[in-house]
Structures are given as C-alpha cells and as structure tokens.
Amino acid sequence: MSDMGAAATRRGFLGWFLGTSVGAMCASVMYPVVRYISPPDVPEPATSSVVAGTTSELKPHQGKIFRFGGQPGLLVRTEDGYKAFSATCSHLNCTVQYKGDTKQIWCACHNGFYDLNGQVVSGPPPKPLQEFQVNVAGDEIVVTRT
Amino acid sequence: MKTATEPAPQGVRGWLEERLGYSALIEMGRHKLVPVHRHTIWYYLGGMSLFLFLVQVGTGILLLLYYRPSAEAFESVQFLVTKVPFGWLVRSIHSWSANLLVFVLFVHMFSVFFLKAYRQPRELTWVTGMGLLFLMLAFGFSGYLLPWNTLAFFATQVGTEVAGAVPLLGHFTLRFLRGGEHVTGGTLTRFYGIHVAVLPALTTAVMGIHLYLVQRHGMSVPPGVTPKRQMRFLPNFLLRDLVGWCLALACLAALAAFLPWELGQKADPFAPAPAGIRPEWYFAWMFQMLKLLPGHVLGIEGELIGIMGISVAGLVWLLVPFLDRGDPRGRASRLWSIAGWIAIAVMAVLTAMVYVKTEG
C-alpha cells in the first residue's frame, strides 16, 4: 500500500473512530436525560369502591362529581334510582356533568352528549362512558368499579 | 470602521470603541438599505414582533418576583394583582402583549407568505420564522396554565390529550408534558420550567439565526414590484420602527388599563368543565375543528383524523418555500396564494363559530 493510501486509510479510520466516539458520547449523555424527563410510573392505589355521597344529597335529576381514587366520577339520581359513571369524557378527557333539563350527560369542552346508560348521543366522543355499579347501604351511596 | 469625515471618538466613547468596536455595527446599520415600495409597511411587523417579545421578557421577569409555581400558584397571582403595587398592570400587560404578539406574528407570517418573501435564498428565514411562531404558541400554551385557574386547567387537559393522541410519540409526549398520567401540580411545575427556561433558551437561539438571516439576505422585494427608492436602515427605518413600537406600547397600556386580564376561578380537578369553555383565540380554530368532527370517520377516531390533518397542513405550510416552484415568468405563484387565502378563510370561519356560539 502506498504512503498516501495508508494515510488516507488511517485518516478515514480516525475520522470514523472520532465520529462514532462523539456519537456514543452524545448518546450516553442523552439517554439519561430522556429517561429523566419521562416521569416514573407511580401506581395509583387501586380503588374499587367509594362512598360517593348520601341519599339526602341529590334530588331526582341531579348529579354530582365525586372522587373515585384519583379520578372524578359522576353520580346521577334518576327517577328510578342512582347511576354512576366515570366523569372523564372519552373525547379529550374533560370532566363531564349531568344536565337535568335534557336528562343527559354533557361535556362542555366539545359539546359531547351521553345518555343515562353512558352511550354517546351526539358530538365527538368516540366511546361510551365507563359505568359503575351503585348500591345504597343505609343512607350511603356506594359506587363500585365492575 | 471609521469614515474619513468622522474623527475617532474620545473619552468614554473612545474607551468603549477601543474595546467593543461598536462603530462597526453602526456602520453596518448605515449601509443596510430598505427598499421603498407600496408594500414596505409589511416590513415593520418583524420589528414589532421583536418589541412585543421584549415586553414579554421584561414583564415576565417582574412576574417571577411574586409567582410561586406550587399549590399556591393561584393565590400568588391573586396576591400579585390585588396587593402588589401595579401588579395588576404588569400581569395585564404580560397577557395582552402575549396576545398582540401572536396576532402580529400571524400577520407577519401571512404577509411574508403573500409577498413570497420565502423564495430562494430565504427558505431558512421562513423555516426559522415558523419555528419562532411555534415557540411563541408554546409560550402561550405553557403560560396559560401558570395561574392555575379553571379555564387553564381544562385547556391544558385538552391540549396535552391532543398531543397524546399523536401516533407513536404521543404517550411519551403526554407524560413528558404532564409529568405523569394526569394534569396535576407536577404539570404546573413542568410548564413553569418550560415557560421560563426551556422556551427562552430555544427562542434566543432560533431568533439569533432568524435575525442573522434577515441581515444576511436583506429585505425581500415582492415579485413584480420595482422599488421607488431605498431608505437607510439607520436611522430612517429604525426611527419609523420606533414610532410603531410607541403605538404598540400605548395600545398595550390602554388595553391593560381598561380591560385588565381576569384571573378567573381557582382550578378544581374534581369539578366539571364549565359551560362556554374555550381556549385562547389563536387555538380556537383547532378547538372548533375537533368539536365538529364526529366520533368516528371511516372507522378511525375523529380526533385522530383532526390532529393528523392539522399536523400535515402545518408541515406543508412549513415546507412552502421548497414546494412553491413559482411562476416560470418570475411572478408570484397564484396557486399558493389561493391556498393561503383558503387557510385564512378556514381559520377565520372556525374561530368565528367559537365566538358566535359556544354551546349546543
């Protein structure tokens, strides 16, 4: 091999070596940074049942938001009894509310409507609301995740 | 560089000149020429944007002295606007100036678009300008949450959910922005850091490149326009710029004094979204589009179609300088101008729908 060829090979190798070293160094710096900015999973305590309110709180065709673990739930008193749903809209996560005048569940953010079975009536929500089981124990309304 | 007619500066000016060489900058400003023609007025929007951005920096620094990015965020802003002398004024100017800045940036962008100022060799000036617009919208979005009021809470809930719906990177982005799965105090801390440190650092870098490119390529003369004459940047153009800045300052003062920015109600994550909720006006057209799309379109979730559609349109807009090959006779490309007017019409109609009817 000529001197020039050897020099070119050596230069090429050094260029490659330097380039990959810099690349590896950048990757070794960026990897912890990317992992750091992505928050760790903090498992929420699995709440399967909560007292959502008392029987004296709601009149027929009234609703209220209650805490179901770390998330909002919606309790509605109908003429026949109580219904409970996840209060998180399936569209873009806004918190829904009960509209007594139309007897529907409404998301004010993008005007989505659900019926009292949690099914989408109109608007952009792509999925129904998750429904919970409701039991009345004495004067307490107990909502359970099914 | 010293001219033959000007003696070397003495005293303090001479001392500074010897160390900083500032006269070279002044000379550069004197040699910089601005074409004068019937569209010259649009040249002032870049300087106006810079001025409003500097107002944001100044008032933002003042707000930092009292704001607490914690569970007391709302109370700290309440204290600022009710107890701190001129606190209401500083906050109002910061909020109004942010809105005016976004408005001026949009007008600046569309003026550059219709005057075809993105043509070769100014493609990267357009790209960096679009980068600055994106950064300013990010400033608006992140700053909106900081007072921790109801509107801000749900706007952040929706906005981060939109980011989370993007395929592949969506969930990572959502968790990165929220600091977890949900909008909490952790989200506020992140938004604060992004608003006062990350975005200013990025803006400084991108703005530096943008201003360098503007300086390097000079002002673009629209196709088919012959300048009547040229004006010196220093002092002629700069003095006219200053008049515009004074008007903008007067406008800001009037808006802040007569229409002080409201604080609203403290955010309650366990309260339903209030009726009439809507984002800031510059996000309203996207909000309305997501509202109009049905739950499913051809078996795909409507929100995903909307988000992907907006993303693709934004990408095409960013790449306009590379896609617009122009008219072979050197005139403005009519097709792209029509596309621009359609974009304005769609955004205006969707925005108007939000303000005309917010419920039902």
Image (cartoon, grey):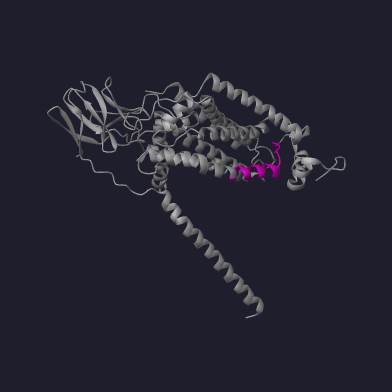
Vertical comparison of B356 with B180: above or below: above
Q: Is residue B157 above or below residue B86?
A: below
Q: Nearer the viewer, residue A6 or B98?
A: B98
User: Does the magenta portion include B214?
Assistant: yes
Residue B68 at what x, y percent from top left? 45, 35
Q: Could you say where residue B245 lies in the image, as x and y percent from the top left? A: 65, 28
> Does residue B116 belong to the magenta stretch?
no
Residue B73 shows up from this direction: yes
Q: Is residue B83 above or below residue B180?
A: above
Instruction: Report the side of B78 relative to A17 (left or right).
Output: left
Residue B325 seen by the camera: no
Q: Residue at the bottom extreme?
A: A1
Q: Residue furthest right?
A: B5
Image spot of residue B289 (x, y percent):
44, 32
Q: Residue at x 20, y 25 (%)?
A: A77
Residue extending farthest front: B11
The residue at the point 65 percent across, 80 percent down is: A2
Decide if residue A140 is on the left or right side of residue A2: left
In this view, the residue farthest toward the left is A138
Depth check: give the residue in front, A15 or B19. B19
The answer to whether B78 appears left or right of A108 in the picture is right
A125 vs B242, nearest the viewer: B242
Quadrant (top left/top right/bottom left/bottom right) for the C terminus of chain A: top left
The span picked out in magenta is: B205-223
Q: In the picture provided, is B49 more to the left or to the right than A91?
A: right
Q: Quadrant of residue B30?
A: top right
The answer to which quarter of the image holds residue A92 is top left
Please tell me which residue is depicted at 66% across the width and 76% down the height of the picture.
A4
Quarter of the image where the N terminus of chain A is located: bottom right
